Amino acid sequence: MRVVLLFSSAALIAASPFTPKKAEPAKPLTAAQKADFTKVIQPMFDAHCVSCHGPKKEKGKLRLDTLEATLKGGKNPTFVIGKPDSSMLLSRVFLDRTAGDVMPPKAEKPMTEKQKEALYAFVEGQPIPDELAKAALADTKAALAAAKTAAAEAKAAPKAKK
Ligand code: HEC
């Protein structure tokens, strides 16, 4: 009897509209989408997100260092291809730079418009146009180079603060 009761209340919870949203079953990505991810999106995440969402730190239980991890999401789903308007990840990236929740956080180097546009196109399920892909990649490379220089300088310079 007890088992039956437990079971039926679990069924009720599952049917309730207040059940926390689970990631929708995603369609497998096409080969072209995977290629766009590898070429344009992953380097962008590597440059701007993986320091906090990767093997070393997993903020918000989210890792963005592989396609699988990105699609899996963190505490919340990241995005479903074809549904950019309900994407948690996109909304945080597109927030105003003054917003407390913006990603990458305020103190970090922001992503450029081209990078954000490319990310949006990818989540929309559109092929990233060549010109946009090139521009986004150039911005990603510039960000990586700047980070490298900053790291080298920090290493070379004796600590200013005691
Ligand atoms: C300096 C560290 C840092 C960087 C860099 C960073 N994040 Fe975050 N991120 C956080 C922290 C801390 C949280 C958890 C608290 C919160 O949700 O605000 C978080 C949470 C998130 C979440 C919500 C996760 C969830 O499931 O609730 C998303 C989405 C996200 N980040 C996306 C990004 C993206 C995309 C980038 C790169 C463009 C990025 N973050 C770069 C620190 C960072």
Image (cartoon, rainbow, N blue to C red):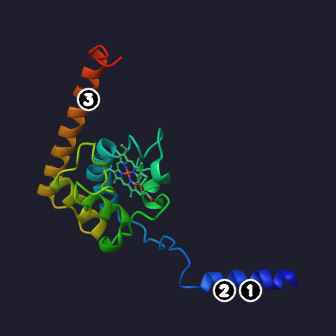
* Residue 148: numbered disc: 3
Secondary structure under the numbered disc 1 in the rendered image: helix
User: Of residues 29 and 115, which is closer to you in this image?
Assistant: 115
Outermost right residue: 1
Q: Which residue is mark 1?
A: 8
Q: Which residue is mark 2?
A: 12
> Within 10 angstroms of label 3, few (less than 14), some, or many (20 or more) residues?
few
Secondary structure under the numbered disc 3 in the rendered image: helix
**Residue 125 visible in the picture:** no
- The percent position of residue 127, horizontal first and vertical second, equals 23, 65
- The percent position of residue 109, horizontal first and vertical second, equals 24, 43
- The Cα–Cα distance between marks 3 and 1, rounded to whole angstroms, is 57 Å
Q: Nearer the viewer, mark 3 or mark 2?
A: 2
Residue at 32 percent of width and 19 percent of height: 161
- Amino acid identity at mark 2: Leu
Q: Report if the CB atoms under discs 1 and 2 are less than 8 Å apart.
A: yes
> Within 10 angstroms of label 1, few (less than 14), some, or many (20 or more) residues?
few
Residue at 62 percent of width and 81 percent of height: 14
- Amino acid identity at mark 3: Lys
User: Of residues 41 and 100, which is closer to you in this image?
Assistant: 100
Q: Nearer the viewer, mark 3 or mark 1?
A: 1
Secondary structure under the numbered disc 2 in the rendered image: helix
- The percent position of residue 132, horizontal first and vertical second, equals 14, 57
Q: Is residue 58 left or right of residue 140?
A: right
Residue at 35 percent of width and 73 percent of height: 86
* Count of numbered badges drawn on the protein: 3
